[in-house]
Amino acid sequence: MDSSKQQFLQRIGMITAGASLVPLAQAGMTLAPQRKGGSREHLYAMLIDLRRCIGCQSCTVSCAIENHAPHDALRTHVSQYQVVLTEAHSVTNVLLPRFCDQPPCVPVCPVQVTFQREDGIVVVDNTRCGGCAYCVQVCPYDARFINHETQTADKCTFCVHRLEAGLLPACVESCVGGARIIGDLRDPNSKISRMLAQHHSDIKVLMPEQGTAPHVFYLGLDGAFVTPLLGRAQPALHQEV
Ligand code: SF4
Ligand code: SF4
Ligand code: SF4
C-alpha cells in the first residue's frame, strides 16, 4: 500500500475524542452498514484456480466489453510476473487475476451509495455517486477506480446483472481454462463449496491481514503473492521482478 493511501486509512480510521485519537472499534461504532437488496438465500464468491489459468486475458477483454470499461481502467486483469527463484535458478510465471472484495469501501461513502447486498455483492449506485473517491482510496486491493467517462466509482460487481438473469459473469463464461468458478457459499453442493472443502489447506485470499474477509479465493497462489507486490513491481500485464 502506498504511503498516501496508508495516511488516508489512518485518518478515516480514527475519531477525535478530546485531545486523543480513538479507533472506531474501541469507540463502539459499527463499520458495517446494513445490507440491502439481493437475497439472503445466496452468498456469492469466486474461486480462481491459478493452476488452470493460462494468462490468455479472455476474462479481461470480456469484462471490458460487458461492462463498458473506459479506455484507461479495467475491473479485472491478469498480471503476469516473471520470478527468478535464486535457490533453484529457475523462472516461474505467476498469473495473478485481481478482483473486488468485502467492504472497507462501504462505510466511508458519505452518501451511502455504495453498499453490500444480502448476497454479499458490493455495488455502487452510479446514479447518485458523486465521484469523491473515498472508497477508491480505502480499498486495499486497488479494486476500485473513478470511471473517467461517468465520473463515478467503478468496480467488479460479480456481473450481478448477469447473475440475476441466470447467466454466468462475463469473465467466468469466457475463461478458456475454466480457472474462474463462481458460486453460492450457502449451497454446500455448489462447485465452489465443494472445491473450497476439498482443497481447504491450499486455499488463499489476498492480504488476509487487512481483515476484509474476501470472498475471492485462490487455489495455486504462491505465498509470495498473497500480499501483492505493491511498491516492488509496477502493475503490468508482463513485468520482470
Ligand atoms: S466515489 Fe461514490 S461510491 Fe465512492 S465514496 Fe464517493 S460517493 Fe461513495
Ligand atoms: S464478474 Fe463481471 S465485473 Fe467482475 S471481473 Fe468478471 S466480468 Fe468483470
Ligand atoms: S480467461 Fe481464465 S485462463 Fe484466461 S487469463 Fe482469465 S482466468 Fe486465466
Image: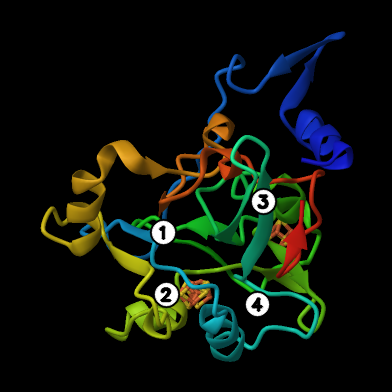
Q: How far is disc 2 from disc 4 in space, using C-alphas?
A: 17 Å
Please rate how many residues cluster around mark 3, counting C-alpha atoms within 10 Å: few if below 14, some from 14 to 19, many from 20.
some
- Kind of residue at badge 1: Arg
Please rate how many residues cluster around mark 1, counting C-alpha atoms within 10 Å: few if below 14, some from 14 to 19, many from 20.
some
Q: Quadrant of the N terminus?
A: top right
Q: Is mark 1 within 8 Å of ligand 2?
A: no
Mark 4 or 1: in front is 1
Q: Residue at x 72, y 14 (%)?
A: 22
Residue that badge 4 annotates: 127
Q: Secondary structure beneath disc 3? A: strand
Q: Between 97 and 114, which is closer to the camera in this rendering?
A: 97
Q: Residue at x 58, y 85 (%)?
A: 67
- N-term mark: 3 or 1: 3
Residue that badge 3 annotates: 83
Q: Between 177 and 213, which is closer to the camera in this rendering?
A: 177
Residue situated furthest left in the rendering: 189
| Vertical order, 118 against 13 (above or below) | below
- Kind of residue at badge 2: Val
Q: Residue at x 68, y 57 (%)?
A: 82
Q: How far is disc 4 from disc 1 in space, using C-alphas?
A: 17 Å
- Kind of residue at badge 3: Val
Q: Between 84 and 114, which is closer to the camera in this rendering?
A: 84
Residue that badge 2 annotates: 160
- N-term mark: 3 or 2: 3
- Kind of residue at badge 4: Thr
